[in-house]
Amino acid sequence: MQIHVETFAVHKRFPLTISRGTTTESTNVWVRVERDGIEGWGEATPFSAGREPQTTEAAIAALQAIAKASGSTRPLDRQLIEQLCIEFQTPSTARAALDVALHDWLGKKVGLPLWGLWGLQLKRIVPTSVTIGIASPDAARERARQWLQATQVQMFKVKLGSPEGIEADRAMLMAVREEAPPQIQFSVDANGGWSLDDAVKMCNLLADWGIKYVEQPLPVEATDELSKLYEKSPLPIFVDESCFTSGDIPQLADRVHGINIKLMKCGGLTEAMRMVHTAKACGLQVMYGCYSDSALANTAMSHLAPLADYLDLDSHLNLIDDPFLGATVQDGRLVPNNLPGLGVQHRASES
Amino acid sequence: MQIHVETFAVHKRFPLTISRGTTTESTNVWVRVERDGIEGWGEATPFSAGREPQTTEAAIAALQAIAKASGSTRPLDRQLIEQLCIEFQTPSTARAALDVALHDWLGKKVGLPLWGLWGLQLKRIVPTSVTIGIASPDAARERARQWLQATQVQMFKVKLGSPEGIEADRAMLMAVREEAPPQIQFSVDANGGWSLDDAVKMCNLLADWGIKYVEQPLPVEATDELSKLYEKSPLPIFVDESCFTSGDIPQLADRVHGINIKLMKCGGLTEAMRMVHTAKACGLQVMYGCYSDSALANTAMSHLAPLADYLDLDSHLNLIDDPFLGATVQDGRLVPNNLPGLGVQHRASES
């Protein structure tokens, strides 16, 4: 098979600030796997929370190495290609792009959308949350207003863990809640920005306010504190930066209520499925998240969405120059279409 | 879709005795799911180690109830049908038959064997063990000779846990080892027939003899003793009767080295896949086993075989009247063919 690799830049309509910093744009990688006249597509998106360098350049280099080594391999040979990626120590963003492209190829080959191939029901897809970054209360209120005008929002995810402390978190969240109609649900994400004391205080407050769950309240290294928070928190705790692959899940099962699965962390749909299965066997809930992914990667995850308890696949909704079209927002839910494979098209290629 | 249910009897060439009793025949259920001119096949095999009644009659009644309720359902709607089975409290043997049939239908619909659809590599399939039941040393030696003449054996699984005690176990195993060429590998299965003391003694002996692993050394209820054995045993411990579904795995992870996955216990290929993923995430090995399954159910598991560390899918090799043809034994390995779906044919339908 042939593997084609090229980059594309995407720019955010509204810059996104989280506890670690601000993002305005991203240079992602578009992978195309070709064989038998069929092309399968995938995307690698760089991110900063990695355990290994997850840069655009590292993804390109890794994909080019795989492309050289896999000339006679068929796109159906996913177990073989995964083994090759392990041997090559391929970064997870590059593995994700490749695995998604191989699945897209498979779906196109057999003429079924991935959700159909997997036997899933689209009506089980819950609404995706849309994200409001760290900002002043007024700016956050304005961002909420913009989201509500632009998209059928059913759930907000508010980024907390402000460098200015939990009083700033509280003021910002209160401003967004005031702006939102009462039926809107909320989650929050501290991106590891709180101490244990702050987290306990905030979780009690957030539970009183009817927030659904809190994501990554503590830094990754605070594993003992996570157990203590789990005992005290009236709110479900999800982890993101603390959980990359299925192998991370069993040791988290006694200290969290759920995990955030992201294609770029785990390395593809194959591993995302393993994480869903492992988490559920461990009695945990699952949510899916994203980085600066375009519609390509978020559409890929939308095919697995009938298995998720919560969804946060909104990054492409905040791009001014997303090259791709795929799953569409229907009543706040990101729903894949009926086309074979991912059902993703390139805007520039449309006639 | 239409669901057709009929029974068929299979008879063992050589009766099989384990610690719980002797089996000479079995009445299994053949399920055919039909839609769009395509038929998907599955099998329900009764077994006695169940947590719920796993009789042929219970499977038939459950499948007839599902057949009535699922008239407008499509074979692709596996998530919906699984939910229906949960609501109907369908026994796992009936669920297994249905889930396998739906997968066979899918593979035939898209024109790919299941192993191809799943992206797996047939060359990763390890040899299947063949089973020698509890018998006198002379009878066991004779059974080993028969296996060696009839099949390309690479691994024996010897049933221990004799009601006559571990001295009888030891004498029988020694007889089989004497009969087998030196390159043959061995595992043993006590089917819960040992006390902790017996198990510790036997595991030390078995390790000295180069046995690869021991299966279900202790009764299901001996969970604390299992922890103690795990600390003391020089031999890998697998559980069978202690582990039915993926939800059983996390709490076993600190006291066993592996699990035995069986279609009839877990309820189908969908759950078998979940068990593989969960076990591997928990750092456990996996083996696949069978009851009195014909080539139909064993061929279904052979499609997942590239993910297994050990295989024990030999029941159909000991039948005199297996109605089905599917995966074939190649150099001791049970290998599925390249036909779409399961690649199983009915002998009577062959021209």
Image: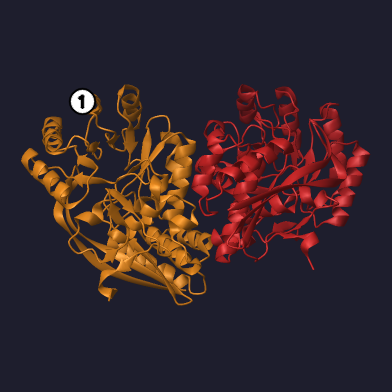
Chain colours: A orange, B red
Task: Answer above or below: position of B198 versus B293.
Answer: above
Q: Is B134 left, or right, of A249 in this rendering?
A: right
Task: Answer above or below: position of B221 versus A277.
Answer: above
Nearer to the camera, B78 or B141: B78
Query: Mark 1 sits on what residue?
Result: A205
Residue B265 point in image, percent of width and height = 64, 39
Task: Answer above or below: position of B277 versus A88.
Answer: above
Quarter location, residue B224 = top right
Q: Is residue B320 visible?
A: yes
Q: Is B29 left, or right, of B272 in this rendering?
A: right
**Amino acid on which disc 1 is placed:** Leu
Quarter location, residue A104 = bottom left
Extreme-right residue of the structure: B138
Label 1 resides on the chain identified as A
**Quadrant where the C terminus of chain A is found in the figure:** bottom left
Residue A97 point in image, percent of width and height = 37, 61
Q: Is residue B287 visible?
A: no
Q: Residue at x 32, y 68 (%)?
A: A345
Q: Is A63 left, or right, of B49 in this rendering?
A: left
Nearer to the camera, B329 or A227: B329
Residue B128 point in image, percent of width and height = 72, 51
Q: Residue at x 44, y 58 (%)?
A: A114
Quarter location, residue A185 = top left
Q: Is B128 left, or right, of B148 in this rendering?
A: left
Task: Answer above or below: position of A35 versus A136.
Answer: below
